[in-house]
Amino acid sequence: MQRVLITGAAGFIGSHLVDKFLNEGWYVIGMDNFLTGSEDNIAHQVGNPNFKFIYYNVTNYVFLSEKVDLVLHFACPASPIDYLNYPIQTLKVDSLGTLNTLGLAKVKCARYVFASTSEIYGDPQVHPQTEDYWGNVNPIGPRSVYDEAKRFSESMTMAYQRTHGVDARIVRIFNTYGPRMRLHDGRIVPNFIYQCATNQDLTIYGDGSQTRSFCYVEDLVRGIYAVSTIDGLDGEVFNLGNTDEYSVKEFAEYIKDMLESKSEIVYKELPEDDPKMRRPDITKAKGTLGWEPEISLKEGLGRTVDYFRSKI
């Protein structure tokens, strides 16, 4: 039985990866310190003989005595509210945490997958964003604690691949949504669903003309699994996300109509360095992985709304 270590295993995406790898017949070691993750996300796996959970902060030295075939480094605060509340922790988990998990992969001769982000492109001047675009990032702005930490981790991942021969891959994750997101994590999908479900003011930052694309978590996890398990991809970088693009105002109105909400749209000041456009070019993922999103926005949001209604 192959063994995978997943850091950030109690997080939104990490917990879905735990389920995916268990369903595919792997032995899963989950690691998390619950800074932004939740025990509830993995509670259904308690008692599974093929799942082991370790409460641990990966910014400390990581040692495992057992065999490890694959390391997925997914530990990191991911919403703007989280990484602005925990700036030092964010910088540490994507520097020291990346160093420690790469070191483990090197010692264990394990494959390594790093969870990067579309935020490495910053406020892009190329649209849609391709993997060979270097980005437009403010290195000292408030968002830099996340953007630059991820960029540094990508650099370290490639250094270990080139210097030590670690079979390392990078996934750049674009906006993803679905069950197990935190209701108040500040991201656009839970914000809009909560506000509409409770008939509160629907808050748009800026004039709403900025664009986003939204990938359902099940589709994303399929893509990550493909990157993790296909041979011959060491040193490769993949955008994973949905190419359907909506303005924030269009998306707000879509959710308002879907929930038949009485919420009124209100506009507030756009946060510093907020990107104006965000859509992945997934040509590489389609051609190399045979992957593309399959779940429509209507279906994905329906499942997500049902989940959030159980939490409100």
Image (tube, grey):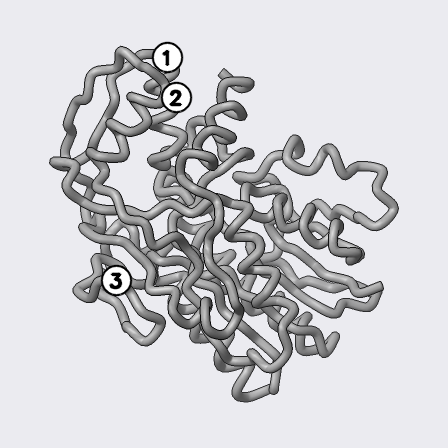
**How far is mark 3 from mark 2, CA to CA?**
29 Å
Q: Secondary structure at mark 2?
A: helix
Residue labelled with disc 1: 198
> What is the three-letter code of the residue carrying label 3?
Pro
Residue 78 horizontal side relative to residue 255, left or right: right
Name which of mark 1 and mark 3 comes first in the sequence: 3
Residue 231 horizontal side relative to residue 144, left or right: right
Q: Quadrant of the N terminus?
A: bottom right
Q: Position of residue 88 (x, y in %)?
A: 42, 51
Q: Residue at x 21, y 41 (%)?
A: 247
Residue 63, disc: none
Are circles 2 and 1 on residues that touch, CB within 8 Å?
yes
**How far is mark 2 from mark 1, CA to CA?**
6 Å
Residue 82's place in the image compared with 3, above or below, is above
Q: Residue at x 27, y 53 (%)?
A: 278
Residue labelled with disc 3: 128
Mark 2 neighbour density, 10 Å: few (under 14) some (14–19) many (20 or more)? some
Specify the farthest residue to the left: 207
Are circles 3 and 2 on residues that touch, CB within 8 Å?
no
| Quadrant position of residue 239 | bottom left
Q: Position of residue 125 (x, y in %)?
A: 17, 64
Residue labelled with disc 2: 194
